[in-house]
């Protein structure tokens, strides 16, 4: 066997103490319920992001509204921009 092959090979699993515990799961951890745990944490993170997004959309304040001819994603969820555009449409209907 050449030296370069030895340096590139990862080898097998090394013996390790079974009594060692760590929050990350220890050596070569692959718990049986990792898929369930991942799904639960994904749902928790999705819920936290949804609540933060909702709070941000309700409390967002703009001094200057975006131009109506440009793409602006936050116009789909920002309460202030939605109300501003409704007022603009109502004024346009009154004027015509």
Image: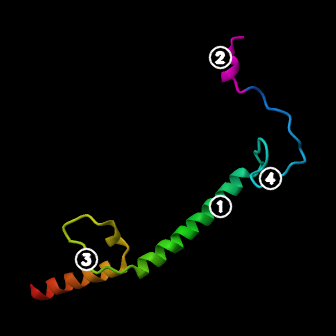
Look at the numbered disc 1 and give the secondary structure of its residue: helix
Look at the numbered disc 2 and give the secondary structure of its residue: helix
CB-based contact (under 8 Å), mark 1 and mark 4: no
- State which mark lies toward you, 1 or 4: 4
- What is the quadrant of the C terminus in the image? bottom left
Which one is earlier in the sequence, the residue at label 4 or at label 3?
4
Residue 61 counted in the magenta span? no
Which one is earlier in the sequence, the residue at label 1 or at label 2?
2
- State which mark lies toward you, 1 or 2: 2
The 10 Å Cα crowd at callout 4, few under 14, some 14 to 19, many 20 or more, is few
Residue 82 x %, y % = 31, 79
Q: Which residue is mark 4?
A: 22
Q: Which residue is mark 2?
A: 4
- State which mark lies toward you, 4 or 3: 4
The 10 Å Cα crowd at callout 2, few under 14, some 14 to 19, many 20 or more, is few
- What is the quadrant of the N terminus in the image? top right
Q: Which residue is mark 3?
A: 65
The residue under the point 28% across, 81% down is: 63
- State which mark lies toward you, 1 or 3: 3
Q: CA distance from mark 4 to mark 2?
A: 34 Å
Q: Which residue is mark 1?
A: 41
- State which mark lies toward you, 2 or 3: 2
The residue under the point 86% across, 34% down is: 15
Instruction: Report the residue that reaches farthest toward the bottom.
Output: 94
Residue 69 x %, y % = 18, 67
- State which mark lies toward you, 4 or 2: 2
Magenta residue span? 1-10
**Which mark identifies residue 90?**
none
In the image, taking residue 94 as reference, residue 87 lies left or right, namely right
Q: CA distance from mark 1 to mark 3?
A: 37 Å
Towards the viewer: 71 or 27: 27
The residue under the point 20% across, 71% down is: 68
């Amino acid at each position: 066997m050449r030296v370069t092959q030895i340096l590139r090979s990862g080898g097998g699993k090394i013996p390790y103490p079974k009594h060692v515990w760590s929050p990350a799961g220890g050596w070569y951890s692959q718990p049986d319920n990792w898929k369930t745990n991942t799904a639960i944490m994904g749902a928790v993170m999705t819920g936290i992001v949804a609540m933060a997004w909702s709070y941000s959309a309700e409390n967002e304040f703009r001094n200057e509204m975006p131009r109506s001819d440009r793409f602006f994603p936050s116009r789909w969820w920002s309460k202030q921009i939605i109300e501003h555009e409704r007022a603009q449409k109502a004024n346009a209907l009154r004027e015509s």
